[in-house]
Image: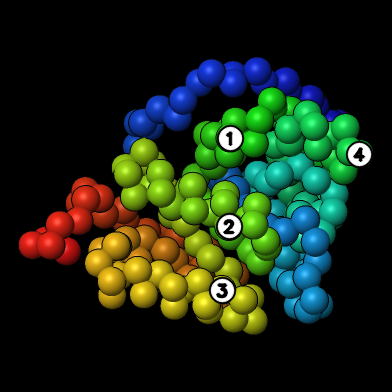
Amino acid sequence: MLKFYLSSQTGNLLKKEKFNYNLTMKSITVFCGSSFGSEDIYQEQASLLGQTLAKQNIQLVYGGANVGLMGAIADGALHSGGKVVGVLPYFLQSKEIAHKQLTELILVETMHERKTKMNELCDGVIVLPGGYGTLEEFFEMITWAQLGLHQKPIGILNIDGFYDDLINLVQHMIDKGFLKQINRDMLLISNNIDELLEMMRKYKAPKVGKWISKNRT
C-alpha cells in the first residue's frame, strides 16, 4: 500500500550525524536521470540495480518519479519484491510524474529538503548517469562527506564509461591543488553492480580534515 508522508522542515539545516560504523547497508539512495539517455545499457543497468537491491534486501531511496532511469530503477526493485521510498517535492508531484506504486512517498517543500531527507534515510549513495540535477545531488553529498557531515560510502556506477570525464576532472582538481588524493579515494567507482556494492560495504571514511594549504596536501 502506498503511504504518504508530508514534511515541512524547510528551516532545518543538515546536522552532523552520530556515525554508525556498521556498514551493513539496509537502505541505499540512488541519484539518476529523469531521462533514459541515448544508450539502452543505461536503462538496463538501472533496472538491474533495482533488482539487485531488492534481492539483497536493501531498501531503495530515490527521487520518487516514474520517468527515465528513475522509473527504471524503481520498477526493477518493485518487480523483484523490494521496498522503494520516493522523496519528491510538491511542485514535481503537481506535474504528474510521481510513481504510483511505491512503498512510501515522502513529499517535501524544496529540492534541498529532498536531498537532506534522502541522506537521512540511507546508509550509502549510488550515482547513475544523469544530467545537471544528478550531478548537483552527487556533488552535495560528496561535499557533505568531505566536510565530515556524514561518513557514508558514495559509489559511482560508471555504466559504459559514462563518468570517465568526470573522474578525469577530479584528478585534474588534485593535480592543481584543489583536492587531496584522499578526497578522490572517497569515491567508489565500478562498472559492475556487485563489485560496487562490495566496495561500499568495505568502505572506511577518512579521518582527515578538508582544508588544503601549500605546505600540506
* Sequence-wise first label, 1 or 3: 1
Earlier-in-chain disc, 4 versus 1: 4
Residue depicted at 84% across the width and 34% down the height = 93
**How far apart are the two marked residues, 4 and 3, measured between alpha carbons?**
30 Å
Q: Report how far apart the C-alphas of labels 2 and 3 lie in the structure.
A: 11 Å
Label 2 environment density (alpha carbons within 10 Å; few <14, some 14–19, many ≥20): some
Question: Does the rendering let one see residue 121?
Answer: no
| Residue type (three-letter) at the residue carrying disc 1 | His
Q: Amino acid at mark 4?
A: Glu
- Decide if residue 161 is on the left or right side of residue 102: left
Point 67% across, 20% down: residue = 7
Label pair 1/3, CB-CB below 8 angstroms: no
Disc 4 to disc 3: CB gap under 8 Å: no
Counting every numbered tag in the picture gives 4
Q: Earlier in the sequence, mark 1 or mark 2?
A: 1
Whether residues under marks 4 and 1 lie with C-beta atoms below 8 angstroms apart, the answer is: no
- Residue 24 image offset from top left, x and y in percent: 46, 49
Mark earlier in primary sequence (2, 3)? 2
Residue at point 62%, 76% (across, down): 162
Q: Amino acid at mark 2?
A: Leu
Q: Dot 3, crowdedness within 10 Å: few (<14), some or many (≥20)?
A: some
Q: List the residue tagged with mark 1.
A: 112
Residue 91 picture location, percent across and down: 80, 32
- Label 2: which residue? 135
Amino acid beneath label 3: Tyr
Residue 121 found in image quarter: top right
